Amino acid sequence: MKIQYFPDTDTLYIDLADRPSTESEVISESIIVALDRAGKPVGITIEHYSQTADSTAIETILPAMTASIAA
């Protein structure tokens, strides 16, 4: 996952997966979700980020990722 902020457009982009998006769904005036061919989210765009966020800090709390190996 990557998080990028673009100050020239005041946009925050959260890249969830390394798959191309084929369509976008507008959730609200400032939130757009990019979807892959299967309809799964691959990214989230937040427009007007500085007007939306209450803090300049980004904290992540993610579950431990485990890989399963098929026998």
Image (cartoon, grey):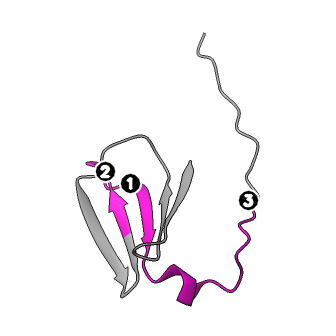
Kindly report the distance in space between the C-alpha atoms of the residues bearing marks 2 and 3.
Answer: 24 Å
Looking at the image, do the residues carrying marks 2 and 1 touch, with CB atoms under 8 Å apart?
A: yes
Asked if disc 1 and disc 3 are in contact, CB closer than 8 Å, the reply is no
Which one is in front, 63 or 5? 5
Residue 71 falls in image quadrant: top right
Q: Which residues are magenta?
A: 33-59
- Disc 2 residue type (three-letter): Asp
Residue 54 image offset from top left, x and y in percent: 68, 86
Instruction: Reply above or below: 30 against 39.
Output: below
Single out the residue that lies furthest toward the front.
8
Left or right of 22, for residue 59: right
Q: Is residue 36 left or right of residue 54?
A: left
Tag 3 residue: 60
Q: Which residue is denoted by mark 1 in the rendering?
A: 40
Q: Residue at x 36, y 41 (%)?
A: 19
Looking at the image, residue 46 sits to the left or right of residue 55; the answer is: left
